[in-house]
Image: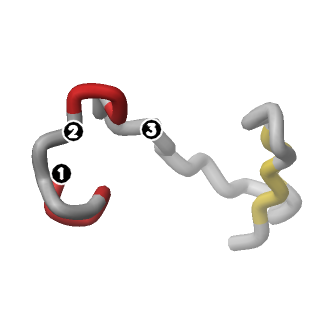
Amino acid sequence: MEMEIDSDLNYQILTAGADPVAFVPDLDLAALAAPNIIDGF
């Protein structure tokens, strides 16, 4: 599957017939207590 995403999170699926599910995790970076973003998930 080929997909393009720009810096405004606009996307375009380039592979015909593909039906992906994408999401942006809800993570409050200002209140992140973990040592890094990976540990925040």
Q: Which residue is mark 2?
A: 32
In the image: residue 39, left or right of residue 2: left
Q: Position of residue 14 (x, y in %)?
A: 87, 60
Q: Are marks 2 and 1 in contact (CB under 8 Å)?
A: yes
Judge whether 38 appears above or below 13 on screen.
below
Residue 1 image-quadrant placement: bottom right
Q: Secondary structure at mark 3?
A: loop
Q: Position of residue 13 (x, y in %)?
A: 80, 51
Kindly identify the residue that appears in the image at 45 percent across and 37 percent down. 24
Kindly identify the residue that appears in the image at 18 percent across and 51 percent down. 40
Residue 8 image-quadrant placement: top right
Q: Which residue is mark 1?
A: 40
Judge whether 11 appears above or below 14 on screen.
above
In the image: residue 16, left or right of residue 21: right
Q: Position of residue 25 (x, y in %)?
A: 34, 37
Q: Are marks 1 and 3 in contact (CB under 8 Å)?
A: no
- Residue 23 is marked as 3
Between discs 1 and 3, the one toward the N terminus: 3
- Residue 31 is marked as none
**Relative depth, front residue between 21 and 8:** 8
Kindly identify the residue that appears in the image at 79 percent across and 50 percent down. 5
